[in-house]
Amino acid sequence: MSEAFPSVRTEIGGVKVAELAERFGTPLYVYDAAVIRQRIAELRQFDVIRYAQKACSNLAVLALVRKEGAVVDAVSAGEICRALAAGFPPTADPPPIVYCADIFDRTSLQLIIDKGIHVNCGSMDMIGQYGRLAPGREITLRINPGFGHGHSQKTNTGGHHSKHGIWYEDLPEAITLAERWGLSVTGLHMHIGSGSDFDHLAQVCSAMEQAVRQAGGRIRSISGGGGLPVPYRPGEARIDVHRYFQLWDGTRRRLEQALGHPLRLEIEPGRYLVAESGFLITEIRAVKRQGPNSFYLVDAGFNCLARPILYGAYHHMSIAYRHRTEEESLQEVIVGGPLCESGDIFTQREGGFVDKRPLPAARVGDWLVIECAGAYGFTMASNYNSHPLPAEVLVMDGVPYLVRRRQAWEELFAGEEIPQVLR
């Protein structure tokens, strides 16, 4: 097993797994700040790094991203409020917060108007709704280039099956509509899917070049979106970020020559910044056999990490021993959670097919660490089966900080009321 994918893990960010689990309890999300800093550093060639906070929106993570010089996008009023609470100002150049969506719900639209948040419109209706209330402002447009890609069909955000973005053939109409409502289109954005490979990501460059030439000299910024893949499995190669930047920089330079003015080049990573920083520590509470199969049943379920049941997503797993130090021999096991659902299995592939995973022999009380869990982990967690949301810890320079306490029992039903007629 490679160093990046150990079968036994003893520490995270220089802090022992046992210390984290015993101090903060399980299930527990732990983020290694050093990994996030490293990923941001790798992308500094781009003019603007705009973090897609839907991947992991804990305030401490957002504050770390801000201190490292990145800005954020938001897909809801709640994410705008998170960004503001984490210290991002509402306005500046480049915009510290961009609302990027395909609709305005009424709450988001009013908050955007009140705070002056920049908008990246993903539908024609957004243009009209915004222009009626805020003529004179600048907007960017999210364009669906007519193709998409992703590690799962459910993460593909381009092409004619996707709800996202303004169809590329409708770009002239979108610009005309914006002008009618007194809005200035100053930037274009494209995002084709999460976990896309290099070849598909490179196609966005040529699609963007065509779109900008069509939009004309009003454009001052271009964004290649996100989707940068990370290695979830042993043997998967890391994307060549410098080569990817060179592709985009070449596109930018050709467009600058054609337009006669500079263009700001943005990238919008989500999972790339946080996926490898995150670990879900969960305690093994039962070891059992079902016919020919061995199971580790843990105290985290898809209420904590939904990616396996949603996409059949693969997450590397390791064991942290409670008392032993010598690594036990590997055995094929199925890993499941505590939920009253047959699909509450972490070792499954897309379609719900259950797989076995070679893991060291473990006992009740040992910990199983689900790795590369920083993106779309806690942000997709739920209270299903009335389980409290897990705690979150950020490790910085070898020191663990509790950045979200575990949800209390009474918070599970804090917003509910029993009508007087039922009392």
Image (tube, rainbow, N blue to C red):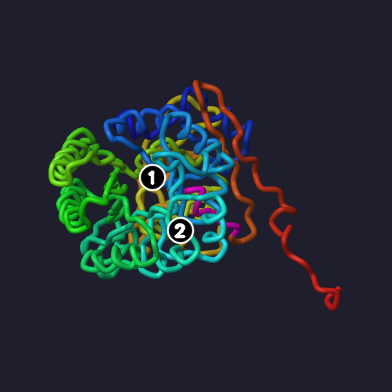
Residue 382 inside the magenta-drawn segment: yes
Vertical side of 389 occupied by 179: above or below = below
Looking at the image, the residue that sits furthest to the bottom is 421
Vertical side of 205 occupied by 65: above or below = above
Q: Is residue 325 left or right of residue 175?
A: right
* Residue position for label 1: 270
Quadrant assignment for the C terminus:
bottom right
Q: Residue at x 56, y 27 (%)?
A: 400
User: In terms of depth relative to the viewer, which is nearer, 227 or 117?
Assistant: 117
**From where the camera sits, is residue 14 visible?**
yes
Identity, as a three-letter code, of the amino acid under mark 1: Gly
Using the numbered discs, state the Cα–Cα distance from disc 2 to disc 1 in whole angstroms.
39 Å
**From where the camera sits, is residue 376 visible?**
no
Residue 294 inside the magenta-drawn segment: no
Q: Which residues are magenta?
A: 377-383
Picture quadrant where residue 48 is located: top left
Q: Is residue 327 left or right of residue 25?
A: left
Secondary structure of the residue carrying tag 2 is: strand
User: In terms of depth relative to the viewer, which is nearer, 320 or 103?
Assistant: 103
Q: Residue at x 50, y 63 (%)?
A: 133
Picture quadrant where residue 323 is located: top right
Instruction: Report x, y in % for residue 28.
Output: 56, 41
Quadrant assignment for the N terminus:
top left
Tag of residue 52: none
Q: Is residue 214 left or right of residue 24?
A: left
* Residue position for label 2: 290
Identity, as a three-letter code, of the amino acid under mark 2: Gln
Mark closer to the observer (2, 1): 1
Lower position in the chain sequence, tag 2 or tag 1: 1
Instruction: Report x, y in % for residue 13.
Output: 46, 26
Instruction: Report x, y in % for residue 250.
Output: 14, 39
Q: Residue at x 39, y 53 (%)?
A: 138
